Amino acid sequence: MFDSLQDRLGSILNGLTGRGALSEKDVSAALREVRRALLEADVALEVVREFTERVRAKAVGAEVLKSIKPGQMVVKIVHDELIETLGSEGVSIDLNAPAPVTLMMVGLQGSGKTTTTGKIAKRLKDKQRKKVLMASLDTRRPAAQEQLKVLGEQTQVDTLPIIAGQGPVEIAVRAEQAARLGGYDVVILDTAGRTHIDEPLMVEMANIKVRTKPHEILLVADSLTGQDAVNLARSFDERVGVTGIVLTRVDGDGRGGAALSMRAVTGKPIKLIGVGEKMDALEDFHPSRIADRILG
Ligand code: GDP
């Protein structure tokens, strides 16, 4: 399963068979390969450093079991540590609050926020029989509001009617009122994104949060973000406070490094992954699958 890293480690370590415990020197040599595999998977540098130190602490002095080769042993330690860092399976969206439960979607423009809003609404409606209202708070791009409306029609989920001239906070408050009056279980706020993180964006997100007190704030991030994943996750988490992460475009990402980077810096669970453009292309997050991808 982990052929590539295992092959590399095999050539470095397998001469050790029968020598007992892994020495500091053996582990250092192995960790150079581990570090390379993580960087190839586009895990952020600071996360790679921290991660390899944790693996070092566990590997040095570890007894090599007779039944496996030293290379396999290190791969196992790395794999277990990856799973532990990536977190447990099946942390789903938390709806455990009085209805209507507010979910706020945040992230950069183009990350897949609107698409994911539609997917989550459809999933809650179809699988959990929830009555869902979606609202677009993107007043700068009328096309974004129209896009959500079209997704609502496609998935048969209600969207909040657009009133020209309203700002994001007003729309958010109106969405919650409409949800309360209309007997909705869940209201999803699809906030505006920007092409990059800037102060006005963070202020807008913070204002919406203060006024609506969302039960979940989900950071939607493109899994192809690479080294920037750390800054992105840290900024949103520090300024707005996220409760979970949704990784999109996992269908196009052979590497999976962003998952590890974002989870490592925020400690927040990856709740769902987007695996395509269609409205049902949303899956639960399985740490072991991402760990396998990262190890190659
Ligand atoms: P927003 O600006 O953050 O609201 O991003 P959009 O929801 O408009 O998504 C931008 C583009 O990414 C659209 O063309 C989506 O169809 C596409 N997209 C979103 N999620 C996924 C995904 O999980 N996989 C793939 N392949 N494409 C996606």
Image (spheres, helix red, strand yellow):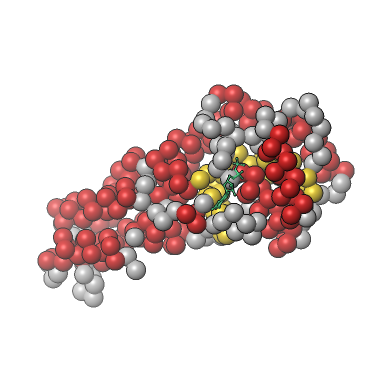
Does 128 appear above or below 159? Answer: below
Q: Quadrant of the C terminus?
A: bottom left
Q: Specify the farthest residue to the bottom.
A: 67
How many numbered marks have been drawn onto this rendered protein structure?
0
Q: Residue at x 59, y 54 (%)?
A: 277
Picture coordinates of residue 60 (x, y %)?
A: 21, 55
- Tell me the quarter of the picture where residue 207 sits: top right
Please indicate whether residue 155 sits to the left or right of residue 291 in the image. right
Asked if one can make out residue 262 in the rendered structure from this viewpoint, the answer is yes
Front residue of this view, candidates 157 and 146: 146
Q: Specify the farthest residue to the front.
A: 143
Front residue of this view, candidates 55 and 10: 10
Picture coordinates of residue 209 (x, y %)?
A: 67, 33
Asked if one can make out residue 210 in the rendered structure from this viewpoint, the answer is no
Picture coordinates of residue 210 (x, y %)?
A: 68, 30
- Tell me the quarter of the picture where residue 50 sits: top left
Q: Specify the farthest residue to the right.
A: 181
Q: Quadrant of the N terminus?
A: bottom left
Please indicate whether residue 108 sits to the left or right of residue 67 in the image. right
Q: Residue at x 39, y 62 (%)?
A: 292
Does 171 appear above or below 128? Answer: above
Q: Residue at x 37, y 47 (%)?
A: 42
Please indicate whether residue 285 sits to the left or right of residue 68 in the image. right
Q: Residue at x 47, y 48 (%)?
A: 223
Picture coordinates of residue 65 (x, y %)?
A: 23, 70
